Amino acid sequence: MIEVYTDGAARGNPGPAGAGIYIKAQGTNYEYSYSLASLSNHEAEFIAVIRALEICQEKFPDEILSFRSDSKIVVDVIEADFTKNKTFLPLLQEIREKSSLFPYFFIKWIPEKQNKHADELARKAIVRGE
């Protein structure tokens, strides 16, 4: 099973954004940090999940994925597989498509203090992108 921690951050709402991804897989840790366009914090959180799924498809196809996020909105939308929010809907659809390529995809909410590594990576991406 691959453990994936994701976080998104934005300076302003919307503003320069970043996505951080921390993956624990097969005894190795992987770190990814992406500068994003001007987005809301919530959009950055969704993009972080999408980017993480893309990484997993490339590096860990056919693995069981256990995602963790400190974004209650992202976790709730993905678990319910539903949103009325017109901004989040295409992001949910992309997550749905990408996650369906894996035998099992789980996501659970974790407190911010358990997601510090992904948060630092997301914040570094904002600084790099400015």
Image (tube, grey):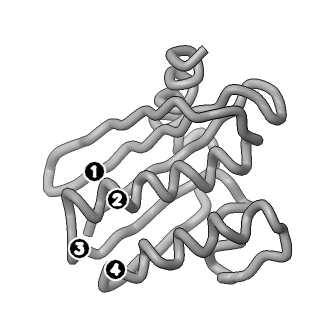
Query: Splitting the image into 4 quarters, where does residue 110 fall?
Result: bottom right
Which residue bears the numbered disc 3? 63
What kind of element bears circle 3?
loop
- Is 103 displayed left or right of 38 in the figure? left
The amino acid sitting under disc 3 is: Glu
Disc 4/disc 1 C-alpha distance (Å): 19 Å
Residue shown at the point (36%, 37%) measured from the top left: 32
Task: Tell me if residue 24 comes above or below residue 107 in the rendering.
Answer: above
Image quarter (top left, top right, bottom left or bottom right) of the N terminus: bottom left
The amino acid sitting under disc 4 is: Leu
Which residue bears the numbered disc 2? 3
The amino acid sitting under disc 1 is: Lys
Closer to the camera, 62 or 54? 54
Closer to the camera, 104 or 38? 38
Asked if the residue under mark 1 is in contact with the one under mark 3, i.e. CB atoms within 8 Å, the reply is no
- Is 95 displayed left or right of 40 in the figure? left
In percent of width and height, residue 29 lies at: 24, 42
Disc 4/disc 2 C-alpha distance (Å): 17 Å
Query: Splitting the image into 4 quarters, where does residue 119 fall?
Result: top right
In percent of width and height, residue 98 lies at: 42, 72
Mark 3 neighbour class, 10 Å CA radius: few under 14, some 14 to 19, many 20 or more? some
Task: Tell me if residue 77 comes above or below residue 20 in the rendering.
Answer: below
Which residue bears the numbered disc 1? 24
